[in-house]
């Protein structure tokens, strides 16, 4: 399949480059397409995956707005293309690290995108803003159209303290750091993973 523009990441995979100018984010925006056999795809998934992997390898948090944008694009990608890619979990982790209550809605949308994201994403990330009780309190006081559905699900989940959620985020980040470092150290790396 041909694309209308060259790969964006070829120019830079430096995380700082992406956060300096919001106009650059457009290079990573989801764009629905289909391959020659009719299977759904995102024209720019590889660029976004490369950027997400670069951010997964950096210890510093990602700009909050950029993290939210990346998760939104991954959610659109997964809604269109089915399946589960590690890229949506990395995006969810990057957003969850900010520990903001309002992000529960973006995390919930990502989890609910498909059967695969429901099974693949850690639901405990919904408690990123301070554990189970604080999250339930926040959601209870919101006027969001998904409030009742999310509250029902939050009540069904095991209790998670803020410390437990912090540990989960750190463990999942370390998992991706180790996995991506192993891939980078593999002599004949196949970029079509």
Image: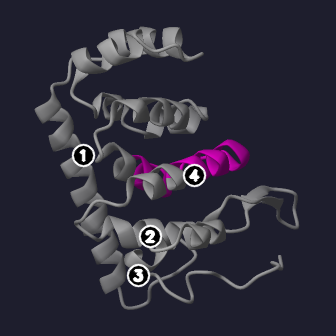
Element carrying mark 1: helix
As measured in the structure, the alpha-carbon distance from the residue carrying label 2 to the one carrying label 1 is 22 Å
First along the sequence among labels 3 and 2: 3
Q: Magenta segment: does it hold 134? A: no
For the N terminus, the image quarter is bottom right
Q: Residues within 10 Å of mark 2 (few under 14, many from 20)?
A: some
Residues drawn in magenta: 71-92
Q: Is residue 180 left or right of residue 10?
A: left
Q: In the image, which disc is placed on residue 169?
A: 1
Colour basis: one colour
Whether the residues at callouts 4 and 3 have beta carbons within 8 Å, the answer is: no
Say whether residue 192 is left or right of residue 56.
right
Q: Alpha-carbon distance for marks 1 and 3?
A: 23 Å
Task: Tell me the quarter of the picture where residue 162 sits.
Answer: top left
Q: At 55% from the left edge and 38% from the top edge, which residue is drawn?
A: 116
Q: Is residue 38 above or below residue 111?
A: below
Looking at this view, is 67 or 41 the one in front? 67
Pointer 1 with pointer 3, Cβ within 8 A: no
Q: Position of residue 74 (x, y in %)?
A: 57, 52
Of marks 4 and 3, the one in the foreground: 3
Q: Give the number of the mark in front: 2 or 1.
A: 2
Q: Which mark is residue 14?
A: 3
Q: Residue at x 48, y 73 (%)?
A: 18
Which residue corresponds to mark 4? Answer: 74
- Compare residues 178 and 165 and report the one nearer the observer: 165
**Which residue has dot 2 on it?**
19
Query: Residue 166 lies in what quarter of the image?
Result: top left
């Amino acid at each position: 399949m041909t694309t209308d523009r060259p790969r964006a990441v070829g120019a830079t995979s430096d995380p700082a480059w992406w956060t300096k100018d919001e106009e650059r984010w457009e290079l990573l925006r989801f764009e629905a397409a289909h391959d020659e056999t009719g299977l759904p795809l995102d024209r720019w998934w590889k660029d976004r995956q490369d950027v997400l992997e670069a951010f997964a390898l950096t210890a510093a948090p990602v700009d909050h707005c950029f993290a939210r944008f990346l998760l939104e694009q991954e959610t659109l990608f997964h809604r269109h293309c089915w399946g589960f890619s590690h890229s949506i979990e990395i995006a969810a982790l990057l957003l969850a690290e900010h520990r903001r209550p309002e992000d529960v809605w973006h995390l919930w949308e990502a989890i609910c995108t498909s059967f695969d994201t429901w099974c693949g994403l850690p639901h405990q990330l919904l408690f990123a803003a301070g554990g189970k009780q604080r999250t339930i309190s926040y959601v209870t006081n919101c006027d969001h159209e998904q409030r009742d559905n999310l509250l029902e699900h939050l009540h069904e989940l095991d209790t998670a303290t803020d410390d437990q959620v912090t540990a989960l985020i750190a463990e999942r980040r370390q998992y991706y750091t180790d996995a991506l470092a192993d891939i980078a150290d593999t002599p004949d790396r196949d970029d079509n993973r």
